[in-house]
Image (spheres, grey):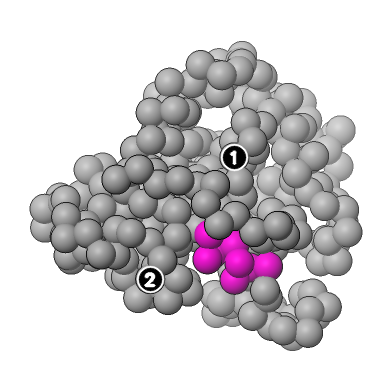
């Protein structure tokens, strides 16, 4: 079943900027023990269920079908579109941030550095620090004209029944896989306890970056990258029936990573010029001089 992603595309942008999804995560998943602001202090929206976020997920849930994901895997996982240094790719991410964002004046590079510096301050291994610094690098998919709903957003398995624990599950009523007997059962095309390595996740920056870096980083880092947006599992435990014991062991690292991503933002920007040599050395330790995108 081929999904036409151009069908019924609205005239308005579903997100004002890519950070709105992350701000919405803070509203949905406030971390116990973390300092929180009142919801109205995050953004000056009259409706707390922001229309832009809802529109984003309406599109995401309609078009993220099993066939769409397999098509994107074939299109992008050849990594034959462009070649860039890691630092140049990170600097590109800065162009994705709308500087009208009222929650932070930081660009994407500074957000990533805040995440990694918080990890570093807690004494974690250097590969963990590097993971924090790179975890959103897959958003370079925007270089190739990918719509926002195919770059960011909560991720979930395709090829099996959509869980009602996924954000805005009502929008899956527009997804053709909901009515396809091959995909709409509990296990769908998978076997019980098959392990996530055999499961196809909705397409976006997480899976793309995992595939890009899978030959270079330790396995816990790869789980953090691949599943940090899989909130239906690491917060709601909705897909235990697909996990194997190794997945459960590795998800301890995913759970350790996520608070650094969500709660490391602060108004004071890191000193990028001072820290850049450290991160250049760290990148060189683990990754090649250029990455194929």
In percent of width and height, residue 157 lies at 32, 55
Q: Residue furthest front?
A: 7
Nearer to me, 255 or 139: 139
Any magenta on residue 57?
yes
- Residue at 32% in and 70% down: 163
Region of the chain picked out in magenta, as a range: 52-59
Nearer to me, 278 or 265: 265
Q: Quarter of the image holding residue 34?
A: bottom right
Q: Give the residue pinned by disc 1.
A: 146
SS label for mark 1: loop
- Local packing at callout 2 (Cα closer than 10 Å; few below 14, some 14-19, many 20+) is few
Quadrant of image for the C terminus: top right
Q: Quarter of the image holding residue 96?
A: top right
- Residue at 68% in and 67% down: 52
- Residue at 54% in and 75% down: 29
SS label for mark 2: helix
């Amino acid at each position: 079943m081929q999904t036409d992603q151009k069908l019924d595309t609205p005239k308005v942008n579903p997100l004002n900027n890519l950070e709105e999804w992350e701000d919405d995560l803070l509203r949905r998943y406030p971390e116990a023990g973390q300092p929180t602001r009142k919801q109205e202090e995050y953004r000056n929206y009259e409706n707390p269920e922001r229309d832009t976020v809802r529109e984003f997920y309406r599109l995401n849930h309609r078009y993220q079908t099993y066939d769409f994901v397999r098509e994107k895997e074939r299109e992008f996982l050849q990594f034959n579109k462009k070649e860039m240094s890691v630092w140049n790719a990170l600097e590109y991410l800065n162009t994705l941030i709308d500087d009208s964002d009222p929650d932070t004046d930081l660009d994407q590079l500074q957000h990533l550095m805040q995440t990694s510096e918080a990890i570093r301050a807690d004494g974690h291994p250097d590969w963990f620090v590097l993971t924090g610094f790179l975890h959103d690098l897959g958003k370079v998919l925007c270089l190739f004209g990918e719509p926002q709903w195919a770059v960011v957003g909560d991720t979930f398995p395709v090829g099996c029944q959509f869980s009602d624990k996924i954000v805005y599950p009502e929008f899956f009523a527009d997804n053709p896989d909901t009515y396809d007997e091959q995909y709409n059962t509990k296990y769908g095309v998978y076997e019980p306890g098959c392990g996530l390595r055999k499961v196809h996740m909705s397409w976006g920056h997480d899976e793309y970056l995992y595939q890009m870096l899978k030959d270079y980083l330790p396995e816990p880092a790869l789980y953090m990258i691949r599943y940090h947006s899989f909130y239906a599992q690491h917060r709601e435990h909705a897909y235990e029936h697909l996990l194997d014991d190794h997945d459960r062991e590795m998800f301890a690292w995913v759970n350790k990573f996520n608070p650094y991503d969500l709660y490391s933002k602060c108004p004071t920007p890191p000193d990028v010029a001072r820290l850049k040599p450290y991160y250049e050395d760290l990148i060189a330790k683990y990754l090649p001089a250029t990455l194929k995108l």
